[in-house]
Image (cartoon, grey):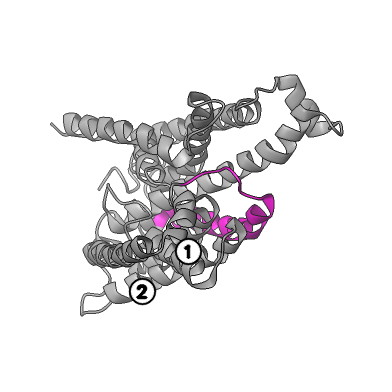
Amino acid sequence: MSAVLDTDTAAGPAAPGGPVGRVRPGAPAALRGLLALALLVVGLLAVSLASLMWGARDVAPGAVWDALVSPVTGDNDHLVVRDLRVPRTLIGLVGGAALGAAGALMQGVTRNPIADPGLLGINSGASLAVIVAIAGLGVTSTAGYLWFAFAGAAVAAVVVYGAASLGWEGVTPVKLALVGAAFTATCTSVITVVLLTDTRTLGEYRFWQVGSLANRPLDVLGTVLPFVVVGLALALAAGRVLNALALGDDVARGLGQDVTRGRLLVVAAVVLLCGSAVSLVGPIAFIGLVVPHVARAVVGPDYRWIVALSMLLGPVLLLAADVAGRLVARPSELEAGLVVAVLGAPVLIALVRRSRAVAA
């Protein structure tokens, strides 16, 4: 308990009449967090520059700068940077931040270290909605998928949370996980039936399902950006709630937290972030799963720092995977979702082994 609650003896006890259960990071944790944030900002700038420079056609750093500040009409390098790589990089930044923060929120609200945005059935709900859009309504564009994916994610969260709230004990992390798994299995079965009987839908759906930053128009980013901003703001505000929930519902209530309202806040943030990210880049796995573990290894169990670092770690990982996918198969490329899976699985295994070694 002391790892999460206020144990900074230098700060002294909480002032009389102050908020109950207020979480204050110790000086070493705060220093590590600030240092990690600074390093991640540098890393984010580096992978963003790499995303603008490297691909099937490499562009020199000077040409990238010229393309951004003083583009020349008809210059092929400038066209590549401005029309293809700038939208791709911006989408990776926004989508990665949303996925990373959503993963941290999911692990906090369910108290499950292997939770990710797919645990509540949000990815499956978005996928099912996209299937309905393709098979039933003939939608074939990324912009067309956008609102269906977002609506599917929102409906999935409402259904899962509503079902988990039934019963005398209300919503619990175990019930959320079980209902989410059942909802995911149901959606997956329906999706499989549709894809096996409709080859046209399969052809359209598979390009969205694998997860990619390519061929996403910039106007799609403009549509989802307000939802991502609100979701990230809610995620940052939920840090204290997650710290209290980590101690258990009874302890959280004893610390003055409204557990039900706190979970609703977190679920609302997850819906906004996952719905936006899935509609923007597809249901990319492992980012929401791995990123919070890395953040936790750096700054400890304080979710205020974990969420903040996850917002930066997510886009670093997603853009790095996208750049790697362009380089390993030139002049063609691998989708970012495939590269993230290849990179994320070993990282997660290493983190689990390290955790077991520390526990031993």
SS at mark 2? helix
Identified by mark 2, the residue type is Val
10 Å neighbourhood of mark 2: few (<14), some, or many (≥20)?
some
Q: Position of residue 281 (x, y in %)?
A: 52, 49
Q: Position of residue 47 (x, y in %)?
A: 57, 29
The answer to which image quadrant residue 193 occupies is bottom left
Determine the residue positioned at 68% across, 39% down. 84
Q: Is residue 299 above or below residue 195?
A: above
Res. 259 in view: yes
Q: Earlier in the sequence, mark 1 or mark 2?
A: 1
Q: Which residue is denoted by mark 2 in the rendering?
A: 159
Identified by mark 1, the residue type is Val
Res. 26 in view: no
Q: Which residues are magenta?
A: 211-240
Return the mark for residue 130: 1
Q: Quadrant of the C terminus?
A: top left
Determine the residue positioned at 25% across, 33% down. 349
| Residue 208 part of the magenta segment | no
Left or right, residue 291 beside residue 183 = right
SS at mark 1? helix
Q: Decide which of 298, 334 is in the foreground and name it.
A: 334
Q: Position of residue 292 (x, y in %)?
A: 38, 42
Q: Position of residue 336 (x, y in %)?
A: 48, 38
Return the mark for residue 162: none
Determine the residue positioned at 34% across, 34% down. 297
10 Å neighbourhood of mark 1: few (<14), some, or many (≥20)?
many
Q: Is residue 193 above or below residue 343?
A: below
What is the magenta segment's predominant secondary structure? helix
